[in-house]
Amino acid sequence: MYTNRHHLTYCTNIHPGESWEETFSNLKKYIPKIKAEVSPDTSFGIGLRLSDKASASLMEGNNLSIFKEWLAESDCYVFTFNGFPFGGFHHQSVKDQVHHPDWTTNLRLDYTLRLFNILSALLPKEMDGGISTSPLSYKYWEDVKNNKKEVLQKATFHIIRIAERLINIQQEKDQVLHLDIEPEPDGLLENTHEVIDWYKDWLIPQGIQYLKEQLNFTDEEAEKCLKRHIRLCYDVCHFAIVYEKPREVFSLLANEGIKIGKIQISAALKASLSKNVAQRGSVKDALAPFVESTYLHQVVERSSKNKFTHYPDLPQALENMNNPDAREWRTHFHVPVFLANYGQLESTQEDILDILEYIKGKKITNHLEVETYTWEVLPDDIQLEIVDSIVRELQWVQKKLIK
């Protein structure tokens, strides 16, 4: 739905289902109910998540035509995809395998090309479309640690292949499509400086050389196209975990000419740690229900001297709860955006509020997507019925955007 100059939606990765049949069934079950509450008189945009399996099935037979007819009948449209999770995302241990296959593989390349073909077929006229994706790979896999330069070279080449395809689509259909790289803790790209370094050291020089050879571009034309079609997905939760301030990030990216393709509106868990270690028991007890086996819940600890320690998952962090120098933990757990406090714990909702206030005056992207996908693994006392939960989040964002 179009709200204060932005297309606002939620990400359908919240709904379990890896096949197209399951995905379409969920869309038909939930989207009309949500639209009726948040966008009864205007078209409702969908942030679609398709697994590799579902995307392949959607391209078979007349499935895509049937889906387009349903979108038209339902007064809905698709403008963004979540192309980060390739395979299973619910009811199994995902953890670091959410990055598999990574951008060094043809599997990731072929999957993402297929998603762009689908998005191009679905996207309304005069609208840009984006697909968010993994930050190249997972930093702590042995092959990545031991062969980092080779991983960066191979992953970057595949992303340049995506850019080439998106350039062709723009020339053929006058559509602007973009791949939105989504940094996250422990990803090969996890913060602003790593993103900027990747653009400068890998994407731009490697991409210029390739596009000059393949499309006879000048250096300037190649760099302009790379920055048009390869953008950043700013997941608010992810950047908050690594203690980056939104306005500083936006300024740094703007200085480099790096565009933001999508803002994913999400909140992380935050815990203040007393100087008195003996008084931290209540915080540890409050965090214990968030230990679960499906997703990675990376923790970044801030010390009294503003030094940062990274833990790959919440259980490892809890083993170090008694570090006397620790003052704050931020945990990768996508908690509901409309809640600021959880008893002894807080969220990083203040970053969302800052961004929503900022973009009311300065537009940096067309795409906003609420991404709270952890409802089914949240502690029981903060779970709500799923439609009510999604509606409440979207209405909360709408209200803050319009104020």
Image: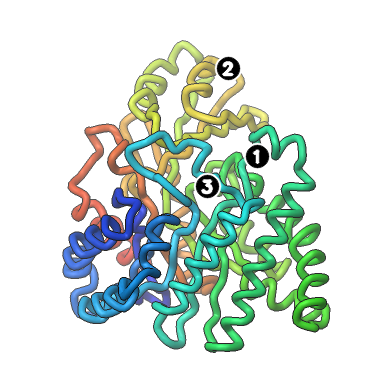
Amino acid type, callout 2: Asn
N-term-proximal mark, 1 vs 3: 1
**Position of residue 151 in the picture relative to residue 43 (left or right):** right
Q: Residue at x 71, y 52 (%)?
A: 193
Number of numbered discs overlaid on the protein picture: 3
**Position of residue 400 in the picture relative to residue 28 (left or right):** right
N-term-proximal mark, 1 vs 2: 1
Q: Quadrant of the C terminus?
A: bottom left
Which residue in the protein does label 1 denote?
Answer: 139
Residue farthest along the front direction in this orientation: 61
Which residue in the protein does label 2 denote?
Answer: 323
| In the depicted structure, whether residue 27 falls above or below residue 287 | below
Which residue in the protein does label 3 denote?
Answer: 238
CA gap, disc 1 and disc 3? 15 Å
User: Whole-percent x and y of residue 72?
Assistant: 26, 81
Front disc: 2 or 3: 3
**Position of residue 158 in the picture relative to residue 18 (left or right):** right
| In the depicted structure, whether residue 386 falls above or below residue 173 | above
User: Whole-percent x and y of residue 174?
Assistant: 54, 88
Q: Quadrant of the N terminus?
A: bottom left
Which sits in the foreground, 20 or 207?
A: 20
Amino acid type, callout 1: Lys
Label 1: which secondary element: loop
User: Whole-percent x and y of residue 345?
Assistant: 38, 32
Q: Residue at x 55, y 71 (%)?
A: 364
Residue 288: quadrant of the picture: top left
